[in-house]
Amino acid sequence: MLHRAHFAVTVISKDRPGIVADTAEVLYRLGCNLEDSSCTLLGGDFAMILTVSHPKPFSKVRLLDEFRRLHDEKGVVAHVRTLSPEELDNPSPVGELCLISVYGADRPGIVYRVTRELAEFQVSIADLNTRVVGSKESPVYVMMLEAYLPEGMTVGEADGLLAGLRLELNVEIGVKAITPVSL
């Protein structure tokens, strides 16, 4: 059995075309496997969070050296953390996967109240994105979450549990099932 070293890599750069390609090239040249990733535009910056692996022996220092070159050439900032076997042994949630959408007037507290309510109901958040859309005169706060409902909870029940929060925050909240597709 081939043993692999695993790393969490965060990458941040002023937004420009090619950041993902530059990062992927570093990993490819080193022979790393990109196992998991999340990338997004945050204001004027582009951010990536990656989980990568490489057959042992392989060191964090090699990764950092290559990313240091990318920083010197193109201003990309990277942080690398070695992952332990315990961190990799994360069982997948067993409940139904759903999409929760929140729309409302932009104001502080929306993310806190929605995520606190979901935590109280044992809903596990897999992905969360927020954005302000609309005009400066009428900004609309949009939050999209992919979440796992606790085993036995239906999408309809989750939707009903959020009814009070809709009124409290004066926002629209929708809960929809995400149907997995087998390939």
Image: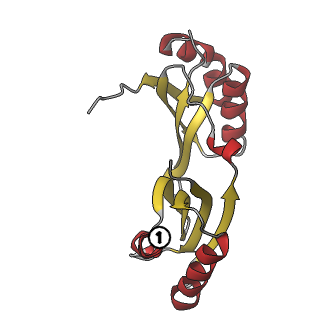
Residue found 55% across the figure and 75% down from its top? 13
Compared across the picture, whether 177 is left or right of 65 comes to left
Name the one closer to the observer, 168 or 28: 28
| Residue 156 pos. (x, y %) | 49, 11
Residue 135 in view of the camera? no
Q: Quadrant of residue 159?
A: top right
Residue found 61% across the figure and 82% down from its top? 65
Name the one closer to the observer, 101 or 180: 180
Q: Is residue 181 above or below residue 66?
A: above
Compared across the picture, whether 36 is left or right of 115 comes to left
| Residue 60 pos. (x, y %) | 65, 70
| Residue 161 pos. (x, y %) | 62, 14
On the rendered image, what quadrant is the C terminus found in? top left
Q: Is residue 126 above or below residue 55?
A: above
Residue type at the position of mark 1? Leu
Compared across the picture, whether 42 is left or right of 180 comes to right
| Residue 2 pos. (x, y %) | 51, 52
Q: Is residue 47 above or below residue 153?
A: below
Residue found 67% across the figure and 38% down from its top? 110
Residue found 53% across the figure and 83% down from its top? 70
Figure colour scheme: secondary structure
Badge 1 density bin: few <14, some 14–19, many ≥20, Cα 10 Å? some
Q: Quadrant of residue 87?
A: top right
The residue identified by callout 1 is 27
The number of discs equals: 1
Residue 94 in view of the camera? yes
